[in-house]
Image: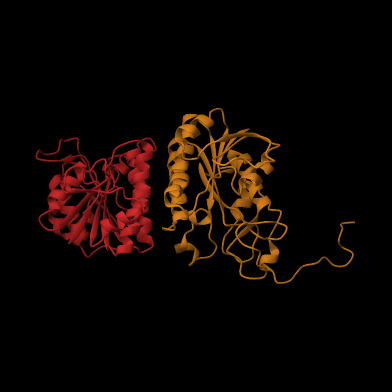
Amino acid sequence: MNVLITSAASATAQIIADALAGTHTLRLTDLPRNATGDIITPNDLGHEADTDKLVAGIDAIVNIGFQGQSGTATHLIDYHTRRMYNLLQAASDAGVARCVNISTLRLYEDHEENLVVTEKWRTDPSAENVELLSAHLVEIVCKEFARDRLIQVANLRLGWPFVGGSSAKPEDTAAISHGMIGAAVNEALSTSELIQWQDIHVQSPVDHQRFITKTAQNLLPGIASELAQ
Amino acid sequence: MKILILGGNGMLGPWAVTAMKDRHDILLTDINDPHADYKGDFLKLSADDVDGVVKAAEGMDVIINLSVLRPHRQLAFDVNTIGNFAMMTAAREHRIKRVINTGPHFQMVGQQYEEWDTNLNPDMPPAPGTRLYAHTKGLGQEICRVFSKRHGIQVITLLYYNMKHSWNLGGPEAPPVYHEDMVPYSTAWQDCGTAVQAAVEVPDSRLATKCESFFILPDLPHGKFNNEKTKRVLDWVPKYHVETLWNKETRQPPHGLHEAF
């Protein structure tokens, strides 16, 4: 599968790219100010032909919708609204079938831990944390493209923090491992279980696990056993 | 009250100013110069200039956002989405308790609703779809909602469709077409302006939540959109019912009944 990964210079994108590299043909892109070296294609995600070229021949997009960019509040909101709109418009025009949006379970971080938060719960972003507000807004952009049946969207809300080699600390009840992130994205790209718009919550199984992952177990069968441990 | 109006020199602004100028102190802002007949305070300001909007809002009681930009993709996001972020940031910074937002009906009721359903009311979950104008305004509205919830700012959103001149029912973009299917709703410009006044002046006690939306339309017989909440909560009484748009009979009073006495 030909997969485009946005905000490719970000840590999240690199975790995902490392996981997908062996099974997919990747095209990496980021804003020109972030794109260094020869591997990442610089692109402003404007509404001109460059974005059309970027998505030509792509089967699916992995969009980093949270903490893929940094900068001022207006830059972050602009990136996660206008530029996402441009990307998805170009993608739908080019016939890209699926977008996997990488969002965050931190959209629920103000809920008490004892609550059984599922995909059916309304997200409650902070107005003060522009990164979270932007993650919320990019979800809306994606959802409206899915609602208009222009592209299928799997909205993966990932736990936090991301844990590499070491195991999660006891207080990290929403932690997710790098391995789980890669596996979840890989599954979201290929599963045939998705409807047009699908929220999926993913975190690693840890002690006092904060978020249940039944939806992920049902829709992403390749990681079901790992999630259920 | 002291009122900051953003984007006040468009089509709706003069009617809102006319409705409120003798009742409130208005600071009108826009990227374009005001009408030659406008006599009040004016500041040249773009709605998406966050620092400029914050500065202009100092000392204000209410902010009204009438700014709109439709066809250009960059500018539509700048004005319709970032503009609302600027407005809500200003309201938060200066503890302004009320914000009036305006927009098209389809920032809430996109094609998924409008082409399928009737009795559309303003308390439905927004579904603007991907049409640029609706989408960018819908994102701006969501920013208003998030800030409202977090900071207790009263947001009142007025949703319009077509606006018509009361004297011939023409609009700024098309000539009048009588006795044919009306675009789902039309409202006379004067009434569009008095709706803004009603939103500014409605007591908090009449508003059920901190974020309320209203369809601004007169009584129309088709039942497509519902204006019950607008009349009940805002106590807004439209003066014009644009009847010749939707009634094939030209109504004339019986002979001798042209005057009350």
Residue A201 pos. (x, y %): 25, 51
Name the residue located 9 percent from the left edge and 40 percent from the top edge: A165
Quadrant of the rendered structure where residue A192 is? Answer: bottom left
Name the residue located 85 percent from the left edge and 67 percent from the top edge: B254
Left or right of A25? Residue B4 is right
Left or right of B150? Residue A142 is left
Residue closer to the observer: A168 or B190: B190
Residue B143 pos. (x, y %): 43, 43
Q: Quadrant of the N terminus of chain B?
A: top right
User: Is residue B94 among what the camera can see?
Assistant: yes
Name the residue located 23 percent from the left edge and 64 percent from the top edge: A193
Residue A10 pos. (x, y %): 21, 42
Query: Which chain is assigned orange?
Result: B
Residue A129 pos. (x, y %): 35, 36
Left or right of B211? Residue A156 is left
Q: Quadrant of the C terminus of chain B?
A: bottom right
Quadrant of the rendered structure where residue B173 is? Answer: bottom right
Q: Colour mode?
A: by chain
Residue located farthest toward the top when viewing the structure as drawn: B59
Tell me what hue chain A is rendered in. Answer: red
